[in-house]
Image (cartoon, rainbow, N blue to C red):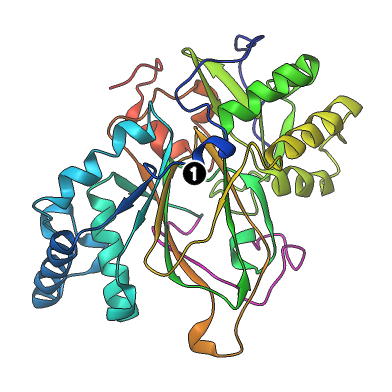
Amino acid sequence: MTGTAPSFETLQTPLDDPSAWRGADLRTQTDWIVTLTAVEIAEIEGALAGVRDRQADLFALSRDDFPLPTLSARLEGLLPVLEGGRGFALVRGLPVERYSEADARTIFWGLAQHVGVPESQDGAGNLMHDVRDTGKSFADSNTVRDYQTDAAINFHNDGADIFMLCCMQTGASGGQSLLVSAVEVFNEAMRRRPDLAEVLQQACWHMDTRGQRRDGVKTQVMPIYTYWNGQLTPNYKNSLMYAAQRFPDVPPFTAAQTEAIALLDEICSDPDIALSFVMEPGDIQIASNYATFHARTKYQDSGDTDRRRHMLRIWLSIPNGRPLPPNFEGTREFGATYARRMTPNGEKT
C-alpha cells in the first residue's frame, strides 16, 4: 500500500467556484454542447486523408500531423471551460458512420492532440481504451475494471486532467451518461452534514489499484477531496473503495466513512444535482476529472455483433491544468500528469 497523504487544510465551508453547477440549471441551457460545422468536418477529413497517405503509426501522430486550421482554435477554446470554468463540454456532429473503425480511431486521436497530451490508462501503458462489454464482471477477477462490463458504473473520476469519450456505437438500450459537479457535490455535503464533509477530506480512503500499478502496490490511500492551493481536487472511485475492503490489511469502513460515502452517493444521484444525457454516435464527451464526477447506467447490447455499444476513451494532461496536490504525485491515475507539470517542490513548471 502507499502511505497516507500529507496533512492539508480542511475546508469548512462551501466553495464558491465556477465549476459548482446543478444539472437542473443546465438542462435548459445548450452552451455546453459544441456542434461541429461542415467546414470543421471537412478539415477533419482532410487531415485524415493526409494521415492515410503517409501511413503513419497512430500513436506517433502529433497535432502537426493532424492539422485543423479553424477547429483547432475552437478545441483550444474549451481549455478555460475545462479548467477554471464549468468543467465539461459535449462535442456533437462527428459523422462516425462514414468511417472505418481505424479511421475513427485516427480522427479521435487527432482531435485529442489539439486538446492536450495523452496519458497512460493502465499498467501496460495503453493510451486509448475501448469502452465496451467484454463479457466479464467486476467480480470475475481482481483486474477487471468497470468500463469492461455492461454494468452500471457509479459516480467517479478517471485519471489525468481530463477524459475524452467518443461514442462509436450505442447499445440496444440503457447506457445513459450522467455528470455532476464535484465541487457542488462537496458543497451540498457541507450544507447537509459538515461533519461528514470533513471525513471526505481525511486520508483514510483505501482504493484498489486493480493490479494496474507497475510497482505492485495494491491500494492507494487518499482523501476523496483534497483542499490545496485554494481548490478542491478529488479522487473518487466508489467501486474501488469497496473492492479494497477485501484486503486483510485494509481497515473496514468506520461508521463515519460508511455514512460519508452513502451521503456522497445520495447527493450524486439527486436529479437536481446530476445532468443526464444520451451519447449518440459521433458525440465526444470532454470533462475535467477535478471538476466533475461521471457515471453510466447499465446497458444492454444488441444481438447484432456489429451494433454493440462501443466508446473510445483517452486521458489527457492539458496545458492550463491546475497545480496538483503533493499527494497526487505517486498515484496510478494522476502520477504521470503530476510528473509532467509539477516540480519536486510542488510549483507549476
| Front residue of 58 and 151 | 151
Q: Main secondary structure of the magenta part?
A: loop
Residue 7 versus residue 73 in the image, above or below = above
Write the start and end of the magenta stretch as one range: 123-145
Query: Which residue reaches farthest bottom?
Result: 304
- Residue picked out by circle 1: 159
Residue 311 versus residue 302 in the image, above or below = above
Occupied quadrant, residue 110: bottom left
Residue 99 seen anywhere in this rendered image of the structure: no
Residue at horizontal 77 percent and vertical 63 percent from the top: 139
Residue 85 seen anywhere in this rendered image of the structure: yes
Residue at horizontal 8 percent and vertical 52 percent from the top: 69
Residue 288 at x, y percent in the picture: 44, 39
Residue 64 at x, y percent in the picture: 11, 53
- Magenta includes 1? no
On the picture, is 213 further left or further right than 53? right
Query: Which residue reaches farthest front?
Result: 28
Q: Considering the numbered disc 1 on the image, is that residue within a helix, a strand or a loop? A: loop
Q: Amino acid at mark 1?
A: Gly
Residue 309 at x, y percent in the picture: 53, 74
